[in-house]
Amino acid sequence: MYKVPFPLVIPIDEENKIYKGYISIQKQEHFIQVELGPRRQLLTTGKLNELIKDKQTLIEIKLNEAQDIMSFLSEFKEILDEHDIGDKEKPFQPSADKLSFVYQELLSIGFEKVKYMNDTMNEVMFSIRDMGDREHELKVILPSNYPFTAPHIVADTPVPIQSSLSLATIVRQHQTIIDQHQDLFNCLDDLDKYMRILEPEHPKRSELWRKIALSHHCSLYLKIVDPLLPFNRPQIRLFGSESRVENLRRVWDQAEWNKSLPLHTNLLTIFQLVPNDKQEQEDYTNASDIECAICYSYKLENDETPETICKLCNRGFHSICLYQVRRFIKTKYCFV
């Protein structure tokens, strides 16, 4: 959930001129009522009355100058918290003008799109859900001199978001990119669901490639060329033994690609029946033998995969597994 600096102070009239609630001053909650507009009144009780006694004139000036409740409360809190700091170093506090500006921007964007916001309002996480009910997050980090310097944008999108001095513009760009790439997200989700994906282990929305396992210890590297036209024929690169890659490449070059079908359907159709040198039909779509024949795992901690293929059994092996087996056999026979 997002945070606002003064969540316990809320408007109590239809014109949003009178605010009432509690504010944290010197690590204690105090009742406060503020009236903006022509009357400009401040009502406090108890200990807070004592705290503002010596600062009454300055607080009245700030109240009369305030453009909105956020700017006044920020300066009000800063004035009173100064007494509690003593000789300790005062922590950085963003200016009231910046807080007010950011607050107004978020108000125009809609707080329902804000997933998280830190206490100083210099880091905001937005979240939207697309037509497929997928969540897309947008993180914006505001520099100290914002809005005079553009914020840093962190987003997992197929194309980058252009820098802007406006949060609203950045959020609109993010929404537009998500809306434009629904077919792409559907395509990639489809591949992840129906094909055995070797890499990446945790795909991102910005990653337009997949390494897909095929039978007989072969694999396929696939990359979507145009994110706006994801159903077009992709770029591929085939891996495996030389003879099998040659057979797969020949079938791929001769196959017709149907743009109206999902990517996985085209791939299954093309590679389900592949003729070998003996003109026998071999199925490459049942990817159940990709693990190392020694350790029965695919990827080791050092990211090594079973790249060594035995010509006799056509099984794959990690090089380190083969080394350990050879060393074990050599050691065993040395002591016999």
Image (cartoon, rainbow, N blue to C red):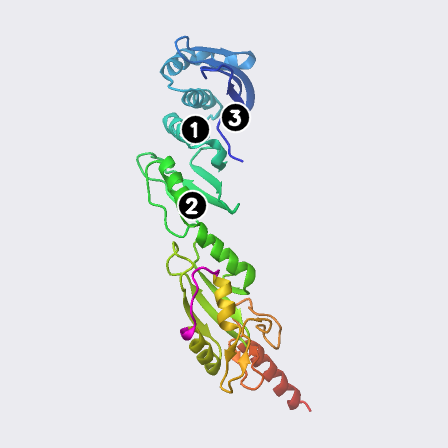
Q: Is residue 109 magenta?
A: no
Rounded to the nearest angstrom, the CA distance separating label 2 from label 3 is 33 Å
For marks 2 and 1, the one nearer the N-term is 1
Identified by mark 3, the residue type is: Pro
Secondary structure state at the residue bearing disc 1:
helix
Which image quadrant: the N terminus? top right
Magenta region: 253-262
Name the main secondary structure of what is drawn in magenta: loop
For residue 107, which numbered disc appears in the image?
1
Residue plotted at (51% across, 87% down): 278
Q: Is residue 48 left or right of residue 161?
A: right
Front: mark 2 or 3:
2
User: According to the image, label 2 marks what residue?
Assistant: 179
For residue 82, which numbered disc appears in the image?
none
**Which residue ends up furthest to the bottom in the rendered image?**
336
Rounded to the nearest angstrom, the CA distance separating label 3 from label 1 is 14 Å
Q: Nearer the viewer, residue 85 or 161?
A: 161
Secondary structure state at the residue bearing disc 2:
helix
User: According to the image, label 3 marks what residue?
Assistant: 7
For marks 2 and 3, the one nearer the N-term is 3
Identified by mark 1, the residue type is: Leu
**Residue 279, position as x, y percentages in the image:** 51, 85
